[in-house]
Image (cartoon, rainbow, N blue to C red):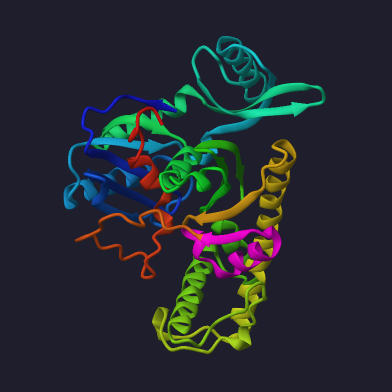
Amino acid sequence: MISWKLKSRGLRPIGLDIGHNSVKMIQLVRNGGQMRVLAADKVRVDPNIGGDGEERRSFVISAIKRMLAEGNFRGRNVVSCLPNDRLKITSLRLAEAEDEKIEQALRKEAAQRFGLDPDKDVINYVLAGNVRQGDEIKNELILFAADNETIKSHIEMLEEAQLRPVGIDTVPCALFRSFERSLRRQEDREQTVVFVDVGSRFTTVVFGRGGEISFVKQIPIGGEKFNREIAARLGININEAEMLRDKLRMERSISAERGLWAPASGSTEQGSSVPVLQGGQNGVPLDASTRQVMVDAVGIVAEELAREISLCFRYYTVTFRGKRVERAVFAGGEAYENILLNVLRRQLTVEIEVAQPLKGFDMMNINFDSDRRGLLCEWAVAVGLSLKDLDGDN
């Protein structure tokens, strides 16, 4: 959304992804034709810190300072993204016109739809392509907007954390940038690929084709809703529900590694079919009935999220006729949720894969303890932030 030219072409800025559950920082450096991870760190946000108030702000600032002090980060240049709930995104269809007239129309739309002040607040857009509406050819645009106070407060927080903000981005743009670099072959660039980041509170859906973003949608469903559903069914608080989900994932992961757990594609997991393993929190395994309640709860929310993503597919295929979606790549901390992935494979009828945003990067001497499976899909947004301005103005 906002960017300044960077003088160094080898060392990339720190990519800072401030999520609801964690704060992630990564810095990349380009050595010839290869990207290397210079430094990376992640701090889990204390679950007892709620909301977006001063306590959370202080925790984030303290976490950033600690990562800077203990890590191998070079310099203080940083690119971060605005929180999803502070960003306004919508698709608009306007008659073909000059850039100046398009901007005037968008400023008016932002004022009317979001109550923003075009003279003070930040309004930007992406041209998604030409579409036919009746007998007319119109421009499909994606509007990004945020109020000035949100941006000002975000910059002040970064500066208090002893960082130098050189760019403020959006989650959709960072997500797309993280994977667009891998679509270098001509046949890849001619395909429509959907990138989906399933976070704690929001799911971000980005359609891309030909190296450009075609459609963006933010869905207010994420891991927190999975936890709330489990908490309601088991009569526990949301933090306990989150810990139980972590435990369930750990049991399934250990079972899969031992070849004991392998649900059929598109099937519903059955608690009785999952072997009880010693381990997890306090060494006490989940009992079969608790496990099944959790599986059912996650399945209900997964079905809801899959329906919302399906509506995005429908909008895209109707708007951009003849452009078929080839595959969907899932990122974010919730992309490890097998129940969700199975539901998506059943409903979306396209190839589903879990993202590997650091595939092909030199990660020597970097230890990502948070992901034993090596996919590192939760780092997609942070990687995209550090890559900002890599090839010019993107």
Horizontal and vertical percent for residue 28? 26, 46
Name the quadrant of the N terminus: top left
- Secondary structure mainly formed by the magenta segment: helix
On screen, residue 330 versus residue 47, left or right, reads: right
Do we see residue 75 in this rendering? Answer: yes
Q: Is residue 268 above or below residue 310?
A: below
> Which stretch appears magenta?
333-353
Q: Is residue 262 left or right of residue 372?
A: right
Q: Does 297 lie within the magenta span?
A: no
176 or 41, which lies in front?
Answer: 176
Question: Residue 366 at what x, y percent from top left?
Answer: 23, 59
Question: Extreme front residue here?
Answer: 186
Residue 78: image location, x then y, percent = 29, 36
Residue drawn where x is 33% and y is 47% of the image: 59
Q: Quadrant of the C terminus?
A: top left
Q: Residue furthest right?
A: 134
Q: How many badges with numbers are in the image?
A: 0
Image: 155 above or below 346: above
Residue beneath the point at 55% across and 15% down: 118
Q: Kindly tell me whether residue 48 is visible in this rendering.
A: no
Q: Quadrant of residue 233?
A: bottom right
